[in-house]
Image (cartoon, helix red, strand yellow):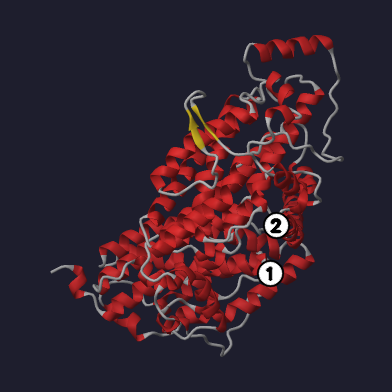
Amino acid sequence: MYTQALDIPQPKGEPKGPRVVENADYQAEFDAKIDAGGFIEAKDWMPEAYRKTLVRQISQHAHSEIVGMLPEGNWITRAPSLKRKAILLAKVQDEGGHGLYLYAAAETLGVSRDELYEALLDGRAKYSSIFNYPTLTWADIGVIGWLVDGAAIMNQIPLCKCSYGPYSRAMVRICKEESFHQRQGYDLLLQMMKGTPEQREMVQDAVNRWWWPSIMMFGPHDKDSQHSETSMRWGIKRISNDDLRQKFVDATVKQAEVLGITLPDPDLKWNEARGHYDFGAIDWEEFWSTVNGHGQCNVDRIAARRKAWEEGAWVREAALEHARKQAAREKVAA
Amino acid sequence: MTQQNIATPEHIEYVLRMGDNALILGQRLSEWCGHAPVLEEDMALANTALDLIGQARLLLTHAGKLEGQGRDEDQLAFLRVERDYRNVTLTELPNEDFGRTVVRNFLFAAFQVLLYQRLATSSDAELAAIAAKSLKEARYHLSHAGEWVIRLGDGTELSHARAQAALDYLWPYTAEFFAANPADDAVAAAGIGPAWASLEPEWEALVVPVLNEATLTVPARTPFRTYGKFGRHSEHMGHLLATMQYMQRTYPGAQW
């Protein structure tokens, strides 16, 4: 689901992959292809920095999908109706699927899924920090669909035209499913807003907690963004963080009115001259604090993924050992 | 005369029992989400849970219609007391590890496949239609879980020991599938569905070859008996229901 803007610096020791030989002729050909709006494919030559940027971005995105299964998974067993339970199970399953396509897209760049996954588990790789916030009530599930998936879609639609072919094709499929998730989330909230005062309060409380983290998902302001310019040049990023954020705010205000909830920003108001909504200052201290490991759930999220990985080691080894035995038996039989 | 008016208590109970089996195992499997040994299995377990919840919705809706008291799938799923749930005890047991989870899925899916096959000719047309749709899913669950039983049984020493321990633990609970039940005789006589006891030989014929291929030892039958399908559950059931019913119990009458 959720790519965060790709400006999150990767700590040292990220997965390396093959080293690319720099070559001026190849570079010229690559630049020409990018300028013409063409796609770079896995077998094409690409500059080392382009490859590394993509590995970082695609793997952060893949990790976000699978870490994102946890906060929503927290509510599957407590979903209030069978229909909602089924919708949530299907959604979380889709996220696992997105993780798979994205790891596969990253593997075309010469890194392995296990290598990327280990970088997540030992804290070298980042994932979208939105998942370091807790899901406290059922309304959080609707608000995540509406705001978090909504922000993710804004970030991801431009990636369907990203210059790297395998990533762009994965994103086309992912965006279709994300739009569906967003509608389901909004529908969940509409139903709750038609309900009891307690249900409406639950929605408002969830919106109050998720609004600012959602608009932080677009990453730092353009002036503070480390990778944006190069990524724009390479056609990996098409629209700036601030433009995407503005687009999201403009679209969301009307949806909030239809729902009948208040967005928790006293400075949010229509600016006739700009033709956009103005909104209040973002608390970047909180953003960086969460990105850097001090959010409420950072430790728990990674601990949960690490526990699953470690406790599943015997299962993965069993599958490999059975495959080896099968191959040996087939060899004897042949 | 419509079917609702002629449904007997045995008929309703039979459909409810199938619905509860799917519901409770679906609920258990959904606990795995995000915690499986590999991403592919995270998806497969979620998918199996989703299929089972889907089956539960159809079966409970049908049971509610047969009952004719206006109870829908959610009232049946979330607002009964423990004693009124009719699932076999095996489905409510904690997941424990991946080994116990796939061995249970295998033993249960084999039972579901046979039951759904036989229901194709049910005199209850709605039940026959639900069974036909669900049979495809149960076959997939059987094949997927069966492959894992073989991988674990024929894998490493450790995985073999864990698969065997899971089988030893779960096998006694399968006796409940086939325990004589007077309601089943009435249902079988009416051509609605088979008496579950009659499925035992076919079930063994389906599961034992796979367990053999997995190099696992099939446990002998013991006097151990459980009675979930008669409403007497294990200590685990109350905890499962407390979680599952939490929202409906906390906010009575709210629509979601």
On the question of residue A328 being in view, the answer is no
Do marks 2 and 1 share a subunit? no
Outermost residue to the left:
B1
Q: Amino acid at mark 2?
A: Gln
Query: In the image, which disc is placed on residue A317?
Result: none
Q: Residues within 10 Å of mark 1 (few under 14, many from 20)?
A: many
**Quick check: marks 2 and 1 in contact, CB under 8 Å?**
no
The residue drawn where x is 67% and y is 37% is A104
- Relative image position of residue A301 (x, y in whole percent): 70, 56
Outermost residue to the bottom:
B223
Relative to A146, residue B102 above or below = below
Q: Residues within 10 Å of mark 2 (few under 14, many from 20)?
A: few
Image quadrant containing the N terminus of chain A: top right
Quadrant assignment, res A11: top right
Q: Amino acid at mark 1?
A: Ala
Label 2 and label 1: CA atoms lie apart by: 37 Å
The residue drawn where x is 62% and y is 30% is A242
Is B10 left, or right, of A64 in this rendering? left
Task: Provide the chain ID for the residue under circle 1.
Answer: B
Q: Secondary structure at mark 1?
A: helix
Is B110 left, or right, of A323 in this rendering? left
Give the residue pinned by disc 1: B163
- Relative image position of residue B8 (x, y in whole percent): 25, 79
The residue drawn where x is 33% and y is 72% is B193
Foreground residue, A150 or A35?
Answer: A150
Task: Provide the chain ID for the residue under circle 2.
Answer: A
Quadrant assignment, res A315: bottom right
Relative to B237, residue A270 above or below = above
Give the residue pinned by disc 2: A296
- Relative image position of residue B162 (x, y in whole percent): 72, 70
Is B156 left, or right, of B189 in this rendering? right
